[in-house]
Image: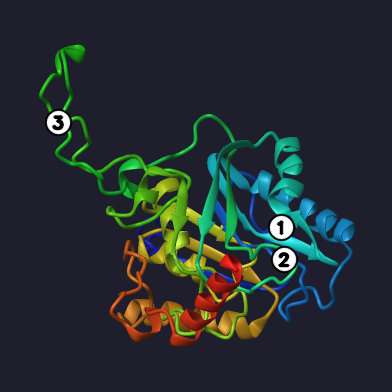
Amino acid sequence: MPKSQKRRRTFSLLEGDVFEKLQRYPDGHFDLVITSPPYNIGKIYERGTKLDLDTYVAWLNKVIDLLARKIKKTGSICWQVGNYIDDGEVFPLDVLFYPTFKKNNLQLRNRIVWHFNFGLHSSKRLSGRYETILWFSKTERFKFNNDAIRVPQLYPGKRHSGKKNGHAGKLSGNPLGKNATDFWTFSAEDHFCEQGIWELPNVKANHPEKTIHPCQFPLELVERCVLAFTDPGDLVLDPFVGAGTSVVAALKHDRLAIGIDKDPAYLTIARDRITSLRNGTLKARPLGKPIPRPNPKDKVAALPTEWKLLRARDDEIGHA
């Protein structure tokens, strides 16, 4: 078969160290890097032991230096992180890594807030319910497909008033939806549509995408980035691919993908999920599905009798 007619490989999953595996690719090779790097909280998939904060940051700074070289001039990096906790003190990882991206002349386009309703409860501080995605571009020539991620208009029937630019009486909104913000939800009725939060469930317990990976991020989160910051046929890299969510999202939307991970067990899960995607059997939360809201008629949503009695007692004490 002539070289021009050879089918291009759609994905690769590489087992090993990220520095070693990326050496096989030239600089300026990838259109999008999207990843959720290890948080250094002692999970089994991390480097074998929890590092002190300075060592941990220094290690990932070297990864960022390498990734900055490997993306195209039109490329982007989406760096999804939470917080590092040490003896009850919170260290925001996006803040700690930001200087390294700037040192590499990358330009921050958005600090996206991903909000979720469930997670670990804290007894000595407010419970954390969000993480962030730092979206950096390499140059001013970055890709941004706004129409691919628009959200429904809250007031689709709203019209211009007065004689503003000759548009009086004409519909003021875009029929494709309004511009997505950096605080995202997927329900047009929810007032958070006016904010900048991406609200979607984290992958816990009965989530349809749950695997054995303990810190898996949701497919929908990656899909939004893939759709917004790449075109069909572009090449997506996840240097810490874990259960393969980034590769699945890329393939689902006709992109090419490369994933790297040192754990063969997770790469096996990633391959199985890719096979399920291609067979049409992949378990996934539908893109854009609204967040479930409690039904006040459900027993679990009703105020328990025990709590009513406690509140009544507290009210009596308060008025005594």
Q: Position of residue 298 (x, y in %)?
A: 31, 82
In 3D space, how far apart are the residues under numbered discs 1 and 2 (Cα atoms)?
A: 24 Å
Between 163 and 44, the residue placed more toward the observer is 163
The residue pinned by badge 2 equals: 39
Is tag 3's residue or tag 1's residue first in the polypeptide sequence? 1
Indicate whether 201 appears above or below 166: below
Residue at disc 2, secondary structure: loop
Residue 180 is drawn in which quadrant? top left
Foreground: disc 1 or disc 2: 2
Q: Residue at x 59, y 67 (%)?
A: 318
Position of 106 with respect to 19 (left or right) is left
Q: Badges 3 and 1: C-beta atoms under 8 Å apart?
A: no
What's the mark number on residue 23? Answer: 1
Picture mark count: 3
The percent position of residue 5, horizontal first and vertical second, equals 35, 60
Q: Residue at x 46, y 61 (%)?
A: 221
**Viewer-side label of 2, 3:** 3
Q: Nearer the viewer, residue 35 or 210?
A: 210
Q: Amino acid at mark 3?
A: Leu
Where, quadrant-wise, is the N terminus in this rendering? Answer: bottom left
Local packing at callout 1 (Cα closer than 10 Å; few below 14, some 14-19, many 20+) is: few
**Pointer 3 residue:** 171
Q: Is residue 193 left or right of residue 18?
A: left
Mark 2 Cα within 10 Å, few/some/many (few <14, many 20+)? Answer: some
**Residue 80 horizontal/vertical position (percent):** 60, 57
Disc 1 marks a residue whose amino acid type is Gln
Give the secondary structure at mark 3: loop
Q: Earlier in the sequence, mark 2 or mark 3?
A: 2
